[in-house]
Image: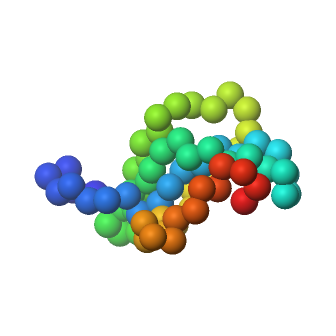
Amino acid sequence: MKRNQATPPSHDVYVVEGEGETAYWTRIGAAWSHEKGDGFNVRLSCIPVDGRLVIRKRKPRDQTDTREAGQ
């Protein structure tokens, strides 16, 4: 990613606690794909103590649902 260009993130970063239908998803950051496609730059608003990190391709704004409960 070039620093002189303001590009929107390509992915969202979530911390997921629990499993299955009762899992709780919290969006904690964003990721930008490297130009060559071999990695990501990640920016987090917090560091989770527990749970797992999930990076998902960002959906267009009108399709974004809150995955905060049961994704």
* Residue 10 image offset from top left, x and y in percent: 41, 63
Q: Quadrant of the N terminus?
A: bottom left
At horizontal 31% and vertical 59% (from top left) the residue drawn is 8
Specify the quadrant that holds the C terminus: bottom right
Quadrant hosting residue 61: bottom left
Q: List x then y, in percent, for residue 33.
A: 40, 62
**Front residue of 33 and 24:** 24
Q: Position of residue 37 (x, y in %)?
A: 41, 69
Which residue is outermost to the top? 49
Tell which of 45 and 37 is nearer to you.
45
Residue 57 in picture, x, y percent from top left: 52, 66
Residue 53 visible: no
**Location of residue 37 with respect to 66 vertically, above or below:** below
Relative to residue 49, is residue 38 drawn left or right? left
Specify whether residue 7 is in view: yes
Depicted 54 relative to depicted 65: above or below? above
